[in-house]
Amino acid sequence: MPKKKLNMGLIGYGFMGRAHSNAYNKVNKFFDLEYEPVLKAVCARKEAILKPFAERWGWESTETDWRRLIERDDIDCIDIGSPNNTHRDIAVAAAEAGKMVLCEKPLAMNAAEGLEMTEAIEKAGVANMVWFNYRRVPAIALAKQLVDEGRIGRVFHYRAKYLQDWTISADVPQGGETLWRLDADVAGSGVTGDLLAHSIDTAIWLAGGIDKVSAMTETFIKERPTQDDPSVTREVKIDDACAFLARFNNGALATFESTRYARGRKNQNTFEINGEKGSLFFDLEDAHQLQYFNHDDDEHVHGWRTILVTDSEHPYMDHWWVPGCVIGYEHTFINALADFLQGLETGTPVRPNFRDALGTQRVCDAVLKSARTEAWEKV
Ligand code: SOE
């Protein structure tokens, strides 16, 4: 049967531009889907970088103004892979033009923007998804399955860490094409929006909504040179590190920690959930494994088991290789895209949608507020 074509317009050619372009190229090779994304147009301001990017990834055309991309009748779906301070305007305009919208995380600079975007999307009634790609790590999806099957029972504790080390040197500049994550005017926040948003999205998915938080943040290096002009030094306004306590709506207690100053940690995203009947532990640096403790096991074999999440019975793995052959980071985007396309096919919309991501954004806002007020803040 001929596939239904979905004409994509991607904005951004950075890290996420590559990850998403790769997903568009691969998804129909590994998943049997009614829809097929067509790489219609990619958009970014710098044509000299854009043209070779488009050629490399197979984009049919280019635009240097996102408004023009949205105006085009031959584009069905806008994918926002540009820096955070562009998300709101693009998403609202795309929704008003009746386009489907995919958006990179975090949803917005703050919850007020996120609400505007969510309302525009819901008013337009367009299909949407936010790329919280770690939900599509098979081991994390398996954790969700085990929680939903009741295997760990009532949750008492949730413990999340998201650690990196790439900004320790004071020489790392801020702002500009590749280092906008260090510029609060472009990123909105530091590790809270960039890294903890992932941890919060996963936590809400696995353990339910968060009621209130008590946070502390620190900016270790107070001034940095700017990337575009290293002779100019500016104050750093992002949070380099953040730790917070949280209470879930269901009464569970949680701790979250994130930093870009954990020497030796490159992308260590972990969580442990302790429930009445069992516990789960995951570490993104060992992404193909899920650790599970089952209290119902006979006592003499009690112990943590390590599940190698590569069998065809495991989430997503029937689309990939034979048991024991692991998949990686880029596959999480392909899995997410497949879920989005399947949602169009079945009429059951994919999650996380804009409304879900707004929930995460609200937690981020409460965390940053609590760090300022030094008090517990309701989400
Ligand atoms: C930051 O270094 C970063 O690239 C995040 O922006 C991504 O969301 C995360 O998945 C990997 O780290």
Image (tube, rainbow, N blue to C red):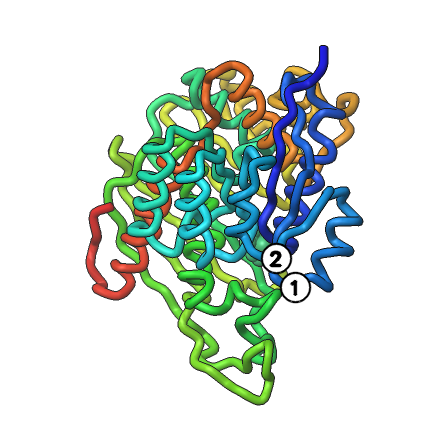
- Position of 363 with respect to 267 (left or right) is left
Q: Is residue 255 left or right of residue 3?
A: left
Compare residues 145 and 263 and report the one nearer the observer: 145
Q: Residue furthest bottom?
A: 231
Given the current orientation, which residue lies at the most extreme top position?
1
Q: Relative to 195, does residue 189 appear above or below in the rendering?
A: below
Q: Which residue is depicted at the point 38% across and 36% down?
A: 121
Please give the count of numbered marks on the rendered protein.
2
Q: Nearer the viewer, residue 25 or 143?
A: 25
Q: Residue visible at 45% across and 74% down?
A: 220
**Residue at figure coordinates x 68%, y 50% from the top left:** 62
Element carrying mark 2: loop
Residue 221 visible in the snapshot: yes
Residue 269 seen:
no
Which disc is residue 64 wearing? 2
Relative image position of residue 134 (x, y in whole percent): 55, 38
Which sits in the foreground, 24 or 271?
A: 24
- The quadrant where residue 345 appears: top right
Residue marked by disc 1: 46
Secondary structure at numbered mark 1: loop
